[in-house]
Image (cartoon, grey):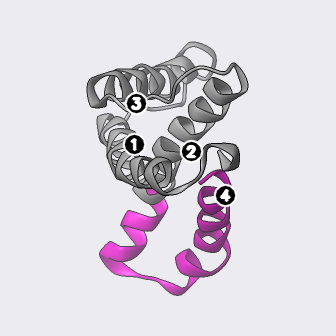
Amino acid sequence: MIAAAVLLYACNRLWLLPASNGWVRLFLAGYFSDILAGALLLALLELLLAAGRLPPLTALPAALLFLLACGLFLELAPLLYRPSSVCDPWDVAAYLAGGLLFLPLERRLLRTCPPHMM
């Protein structure tokens, strides 16, 4: 999942964004990376949990709370050290959407992969 998010981000920056226009370009430039970031944040959390031999985070409320905290931090922290930065609440919604897209994929992987493959 981590590799997929990084690959999709690179494809977006290198090919999709330059080839698009209109509302598609606005979406790709403004929110697609944030959606990928939401999935990436959960995938990284899962990697850390697995490294610590802890169970995966599969509860929706816990995942959404984690993503909300990360999203608020990523949107508000730059305001402390970069006065020209702006906070976009839609970015936080995109982080949450990315996590909501990631969770069903993760659950499916957990059901289909043998334990030694995870």
What residue is shown at x 54% (from left), y 18% (from top)?
A: 77
**Residues tagged 2 and 4 counted as in contact (Cβ below 8 A):** yes
* Vertical arrangement, residue 91 with respect to residue 11, above or below: above
Residue 104 at what x, y percent from top left? 35, 51
Q: Is residue 16 magenta?
A: yes
* Vertical arrangement, residue 87 with respect to residue 94, above or below: above
Q: Quadrant of the N terminus?
A: bottom right
Q: Residues within 10 Å of mark 4 (few under 14, many from 20)?
A: some
Q: CA distance from mark 3 to mark 1?
A: 20 Å
The span shown in magenta is: 1-30
Q: Nearer the viewer, residue 60 or 71?
A: 60
Q: Nearer the viewer, residue 115 or 98?
A: 115
**Disc 4 residue type (three-letter):** Val
The circle drawn on residue 6 is 4
Q: CA distance from mark 2 to mark 1?
A: 8 Å
- Label whose residue precedes the other's in the sequence (2 or 3): 2
Q: Nearer the viewer, residue 110 or 81?
A: 110
Q: CA distance from mark 4 to mark 3?
A: 24 Å
- Label whose residue precedes the other's in the sequence (3 or 1): 3
The circle drawn on residue 40 is 2
* Vertical arrangement, residue 115 with respect to residue 70, above or below: below
What residue is shown at x 63% (from left), y 73% (from top)?
A: 11
In the picture of the structure, the residue carrying the numbered disc 1 is 99
Residue 80 at what x, y percent from top left? 56, 13
Q: Secondary structure at mark 2?
A: helix
Q: CA distance from mark 4 to mark 1?
A: 15 Å
In the picture of the structure, the residue carrying the numbered disc 3 is 87
**Residues tagged 4 and 1 counted as in contact (Cβ below 8 A):** no
